[in-house]
Amino acid sequence: MNHKLNYPESRNEGLALPRQYCDTSDQQKNFCYGNIIINPSDTTAIEGETITLQCVFAIPKYAEEKCFWSKDGTIINIDNFTGIYVWTGDSNRGNCSLQIIGVANNRDDGQWVCQIPRSMNYNGDYSKPANLNVYVKPSQPVIYYGQAEIPHNAKITAKQNETVEIECVSRYGNPVAKLGWLLDNMRLDSDKDIISAEEDRKKTFKRTIQLNRMFGQSNNGKSLRCTLQHETMKTSSIYAVILNIQYSTTSIEVNLPSYIELDEGTSIILPCVADGNPPAKCEWMMKENNNKQWVVKTEQCNYSIESMNANDEGQYMCLAGNEQLLPSKEITVKLRRSKKDISGIIGAIIAAIFFVIVIILLVVVFILRRKVIKETKELPTREALDRASTTKLNFKQQIIEPDYMVPLPSEDAPLNPPTDSDVRYCKGESFRSTKGSSHIYSDPHIYENIPANTRSSDNRDSCQMDDGHYTEI
């Protein structure tokens, strides 16, 4: 059964105090604990360690009183804690030193006093109180995000410039654990720091620090760490999470010049690098030299030309983005041709030019020839002249006089055609006859330019030659 002890307010009240047993410090304070030789001292231990509380009294030889200990004013029955509390000396002769094996915070933490009770042979004595502080190693820190525990080194996802609330908690520590924040190697101040006693384990404490922050694109991939320091630990304990900050694609880079010339058979990789989180999707597009349409070549961020040939010539462009696809700069890829190829191309060009010139010359010759033929047809033929001459010679012998006579041309023919009332025309012939006249006219435009009422009464459009005369039909 535990008993409460009431210590006198004055440490030497009612006790026989031999001065020779007082320690120096107590003598300076003008009081001491009687016959005590060694007082227990304040001790700090980590839970689970083994420690010894020393206490030795100088008692008369005739006094045989057993020591006892009290904690926080309550007498402890040592015999009830076999294997935990062990006397290290003769407790019946004043050596009250006590060993505690595997100190426990909830059992041993407190103020200890050793004492020899008063008896008929001895006035009794007690030591000065000694504080035994039993430190308890706190639990590892844990990070909570959205009220959920996040595994160590796992990712937490948040949108750019969105305020997030992250907590770090450590429990069951004595004394209270020291917690802090690090963003990579940069220290961050906590926005809240809460300390509370644990209800399910006395003399231990819970500590919570809270961080309310907005993180930007530059923080993506950084390590947010909660650090714990404690008297029971030689080094700090760290619990980390990785920031996964989501942001839209803003830039696309193709680390190649805008114009590339490759030898036939060579290879090249066209890289496309785009920022953004989640990672951007990519498409490589190609537009051939003779095609106005862009064609998708691959949906990967890198496009490889394995063996360069003429089919690979054209313009290339990368489209990338995580919300919408954005275009990169255009890359022109050309095939570098050898001198042999160039000479062949030049020869082909010369041949094509020569062919075009020949065609043009043939067309010109054809046009000129047609023109000459046409003009030749419009001139009177030798046969026509001969017939006209014959008609003139036989003019008087003709029995039937035709309506229109075509006399031979004469040197005294009038320079101007006769009046319209005396002229009859035959369309489609180069000769024009004048009724009752021996003159011949060869103006091909007269017929078309004269009034319609002066033409043949029956509007005949051609003439028939008969024995050197043209008769309107």
Image (tube, rainbow, N blue to C red):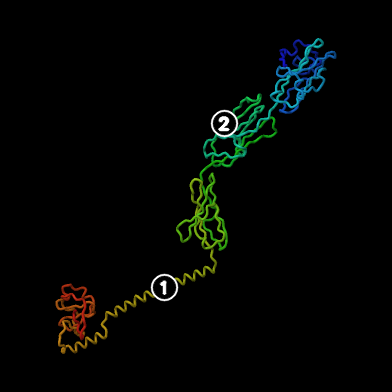
Considering depth in this image, is 217 or 400 the residue closer to the camera?
Answer: 400
Considering depth in this image, is 201 or 113 the residue closer to the camera?
Answer: 201
Q: Kindly identify the residue that appears in the image at 72 percent across and 23 percent down.
A: 132
- Helix or strand or loop: what does disc 2 sit on? loop
Q: Mark 1 is on which residue type? A: Ile
| Image coords of residue 119 (percent x, y) | 79, 11
- Give the spatial CA distance, label 2 vs label 1: 88 Å
In the image: residue 169, left or right of residue 60: left
Residue 77 location, quadrant: top right
Give the total number of marks visible in the rendering.
Answer: 2
In this view, the residue farthest toward the right is: 61
Q: Is residue 315 above or below residue 114?
A: below
Q: Is residue 113 above or below residue 315?
A: above
| Residue at numbered disc 2 | 191
Q: Which mark is residue 357?
A: 1
Quarter of the figure that contains the N terminus = top right
Please tell me how crowded label 2 is: few (under 14), some (14-19), or many (20+) other residues with Cα within 10 Å: few
| Image coords of residue 453 (percent x, y) | 16, 73
